[in-house]
Image (cartoon, rainbow, N blue to C red):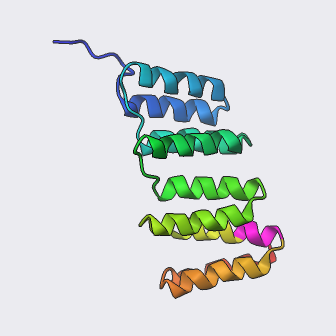
Amino acid sequence: MKEVGIFQSVLHFTTLIDGLSRAGNLDACHYFFNEMIKIGCVPDVVCYTVMMTGYIVAGEFDKAQEMFDEMISHGQLPNVFTYDSMIRGLCMDGKFEEACLMLKEMESRGCKPNFLVYTTLVSYLRNAGRLSKAHGIIRHMVEKGQYSLLLGKIKRYRRL
């Protein structure tokens, strides 16, 4: 019987990478991500999302975009948390049109946006003074029949 080491599962590596990312050590994250692949562990959507989020928090959106593209090329489909992180990163980078396009891409791939995705996009648009675009996102959300009960919560953010 083969002995299994402590870091021989995607879950273990993802947990380690998440902790290192929260501590701001992206070099170590990148190292362990590559080590995981070297020993034959295939990163899943959660692991990729943790890596992307770390890059976004550090303001390295280009690296997050590279991870996003790599994830898709390796057959991992983004989930709602992946899209939320990428939309947040695009907004932080001032790429509001791309963020809105990512919302459309998300929906076209069959991934239903949750309330957090909408509030992320709307709050960044409003903070940037793009009120008509923010209201357009809210209209889109309501037209889709989503979260109309929570509409009041979004409207409270008008003064942000």
**Image location (x, y in percent) of residue 107:** 48, 69
Report which quarter residue 4 is drawn in: top left
Residue 113 can be seen in this image = no
Point out the image quarter for the C terminus.
bottom right
Say if 148 sits above or below 70 in the image: below
- Quarter of the image containing the N terminus? top left
Q: Please say whether residue 5 is one of the residues in the magenta stretch.
A: no
Quadrant for residue 96, please give it: bottom right
Rendered position, 82 above or below 54: below
Name the residue rendered at 39%, 21% in the picture: 7
Residue 20, image x and y in percent?
Answer: 59, 29
> Residue 36: x, y in percent?
43, 24
Q: What stretch is highlighted in magenta?
A: 123-128
Q: Is residue 89 left or right of residue 12?
A: right
* 99 relative to 114 in the view: left or right: right
- State the residue lying farthest toward the front: 73
Q: Which residue is drawn at 68% across and 62% down?
A: 98
Left or right: residue 160 versus residue 47 is: right
Identify the residue shown where x is 75% and y is 70%.
125
Q: Nearer the viewer, residue 144 or 160?
A: 144
Regarding residue 148, the answer to whether it shows in the image is yes
Which residue sits furthest right?
129
Magenta stretch holds residue 127? yes
Measured from the top left, where is residue 147 in percent x and y? 51, 80
Q: Is the magenta stretch mostly helix, strand or loop?
A: helix
Q: How many marks?
A: 0
Q: Is residue 128 left or right of residue 76?
A: right
Look at the picture and state if 70 lies above or below 138. Answer: above
Residue at x 61% of width, y 34% of height: 21
Seen in the picture, residue 105 relative to 64 is either above or below; the reply is: below
Residue that sits furthest to the left in the current view: 1
